[in-house]
Amino acid sequence: IVVTFALNEPGTAYCRASRLDSGETAADMPISRIMTAAWSGEADGGMTEATIEITNLENVNPLLTVRDDEVAAIQEATQYNVYCFAMDNATDSNGFPRPQYMTQDYVGTAVGSAVSPLGGTTQGVWVTDATPPTLIYVSSESVSHETLQLTLQLDEPGTIWCAAVELDGSPGAVHCKESEVQDSNSASGTCYWETLIKGSATHNTVFRSDVAEAYRDVKIEVNQILQKDEAGSAPLLHETSYSIFCFAEDDWLIEADAASTQSVSYAQPAGPNQLSFATAQSFQSTIGQQTTLDETPPTFTKLEIQDPTASNN
């Protein structure tokens, strides 16, 4: 968490972060407690801005203190309230320090505006989630003659998509082959990985699952294959092997935008964190080839009985 500040005169600012879900409020943040976090910065009182970079609840070494320290690293995808106060560098007539402190009421008042702050409290500061979700393979099976089912997990809330492609060496050129899936050209008809895997609602090839909770099984059933030109689709063939590609992204953008508390400096994230193409390729290898079932009983191709029989025994 980076706090940027300026003062109207030379002085020192102190800040302390507290998780939004901790239940703590400004009433729990006396000036003395803010100072014990030991995150501070000095300002010259001019136009130059100063910064305080907070990476832990307290900037202390527990081995060197005799109190109960609050040592916990700042966590990504988590909201914090940040409480700041400042004191100046005033001296008395003999040149000894005689600092003037911001009042407790001022410290507990919401900032309101970053360029014209009314107080020292900023609520709901997000720590950026910069980590893509991890896709976890649980199992896979063919559940019918044209449906492949995958059981998957994510390590955080998000969304998973999967799609079938033909194996290299399969006859025809209507559908994408596994080696044709790529991430360098997003033009239509090029087997661009994200477009292919997310599918087309028009052609019934969107096979996805929303993951509401980390490490919870979700099932995705794939029963159609999108054409390479994205103009149509076809059911999976009976007793045929396919390769499965999957794509995932987290709920970071949705979570950040939907938060009930937003800081005065909140700016919408650029987008969700997404699985890389290299990871998708590796995951495709983990899944391996999947083959649809044979659910069709056999039929006679010939049924002839000699009549009369060749012998009587």
Image (spheres, rainbow, N blue to C red):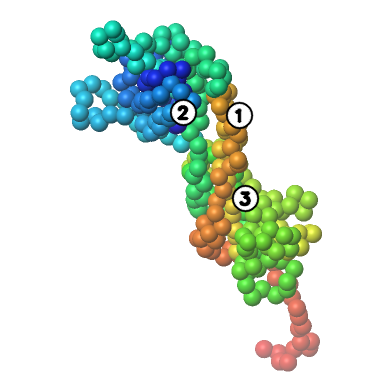
Q: Is residue 190 shown left or right of residue 259?
A: right
Q: Residue at x 39, y 20 (%)?
A: 10
Q: Give whichever of 157, 300 is nearer the camera.
A: 157
Tell me the amino acid under the disc marked 3: Trp
Write down the residue under mark 3. Answer: 161
Q: Alpha-carbon neighbours of circle 1 within 10 Å: few (<14), some, or many (≥20)?
A: few
Mark 3 to mark 1: distance in Å? Answer: 23 Å
Tell me the amino acid under the disc marked 1: Ala
* Secondary element type, mark 2: loop
* Secondary element type, mark 3: strand
Q: Please say if 224 is above or below 18.
A: below
Write down the residue under mark 2. Answer: 48
Q: Give whichever of 272, 44 is nearer the camera.
A: 44
How many marks the image carries: the answer is 3
Tell me the amino acid under the disc marked 2: Thr
Report x, y in % for residue 254: 60, 35
**Marker disc for residue 258:** 1
Q: Residue at x 64, y 58 (%)?
A: 193
Mark 3 to mark 2: distance in Å? Answer: 49 Å
Report x, y in % for residue 240: 65, 68
Mark 1 to mark 2: distance in Å? Answer: 35 Å
Q: Give whichever of 110, 163 is nearer the camera.
A: 110
Report x, y in % for residue 184: 63, 61
Asked if the residues shown at circle 3 and circle 2 are in contact, with their CB atoms under 8 angstroms apart, the answer is no
